[in-house]
Amino acid sequence: MIDKEKILDLAQKYILKNQPKKAIAEYIKLIEADPKDKRLYLKLGDLYYKNGDYEKAIAEYLKLAELYAEEDLNSRAISIYKKVLSINPKHIDTLHRIAGLYLKEGLSGNARNYYSNILEINPTDEAARQALDRLDTSLPSKEVPKGTSAPPFPDSHFPTEIKPRDDKSDLFPASVVDPQPQGSPEPVEIHPPDKEAEMHYHLGIAYKEMELYDYAISEFEQASNSPAIKFDCAIMLGTCYLEKGDSARAIQYFKEGTQLKGLNREKLARLHFNLGLAYEANGMLSEALETFQHVLKLDSSFIEAQERIKKLENLPK
């Protein structure tokens, strides 16, 4: 048995001392002891990438993607495969794997784009040619514009001290009528999102959890075209920008979210709470205090809002 926490601490010390090779050696020990810990492959791949060992980075990312695929976590597997493509856009095996996962998810239009990319790189790839022939003789589930690709590889970002409250508790209802706040004219019927929007949303979640916020933002923006998850995307887009330290853009998205029709008091409270956090991060303390007070008008049991109000009221004048 190894002391995992001790080795992680040692690896972190090597990273802080700018000794990536020593940190890599420690992460290899951890993976040997626990080959199912997905976070280790991601961190090791990142260390190889930052050290300029791109082929080794790709190898670790591919191992991670396979672990996700084995558990049918297809959106997360796709997000890692796209990370590989950001290093090597002509990695044929990765292009095949992404296309296959899109087919598994019923997104034949996305799969077609990747098979077409393969043939542009290697016109003699018979597997891609046969896959395209099969797709051309069947009905596509969802078409997407040609040329769709992963966003550019982002710089590393670290989360801010203020943590927004994500909303993932009631995603993708079969068909619901979401009651509006008191005083609103009529409830708004919300239909489930289409398959493509749902995939973009889950890709965004996967990227966000890996702190790849630029990737996540791109996916949430595409998913937000579906009215069924526009609220969830507003929360996530604002959260990503707040994590990136761009509180002004976070404010923009949270405010846009508050204008959506059909939101009940609970959802409005969550949105306004996140808006208050963004105001606070932007140094707009009076606006933050006012917004947190509004949260309590919507939901008097919102403990986090009570805590933020207490903190702001106790600040020196």
Image (cartoon, rainbow, N blue to C red):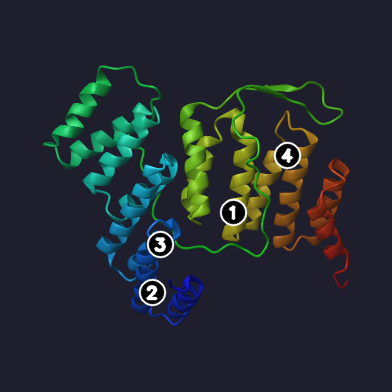
Disc 4 residue type? Thr
* Residue at numbered disc 4: 258
**Marks 2, 3: nearer the viewer:** 3
Residue drawn 88% across and 64% down? 313
- Disc number placed over residue 241 in the picture, else none: 1
Residue drawn 66% across and 65% down? 161
Disc 2 residue type? Glu
Rendered view: 79 above or below 140: below
- Real-space CA distance between mark 1 and mark 3, rounded to the nearest whole angstrom: 34 Å
> Could you say which quadrant of the image residue 285 lies in?
bottom right
Disc 1 residue type? Tyr
- Real-space CA distance between mark 2 and mark 1, rounded to the nearest whole angstrom: 33 Å
> Could you say which quadrant of the image residue 74 lies in?
top left
Residue at the outermost bottom position: 17
Dots 2 and 3: beta carbons under 8 Å? no
On the image, the x and y values in percent for residue 293 come to: 86, 51
On the image, the x and y values in percent for residue 217 come to: 52, 47
State whether residue 145 appears in this view.
Answer: no
**Marks 3, 4: nearer the viewer:** 3
Dots 1 and 3: beta carbons under 8 Å? no
Asked if residue 21 lies left or right of residue 192, the reply is left
Disc 3 residue type? Asp
Asked if residue 144 lies left or right of residue 257, the reply is left
Residue drawn 72% across and 36% down? 259
- Real-space CA distance between mark 1 and mark 4, rounded to the nearest whole angstrom: 17 Å
Dots 1 and 4: beta carbons under 8 Å? no
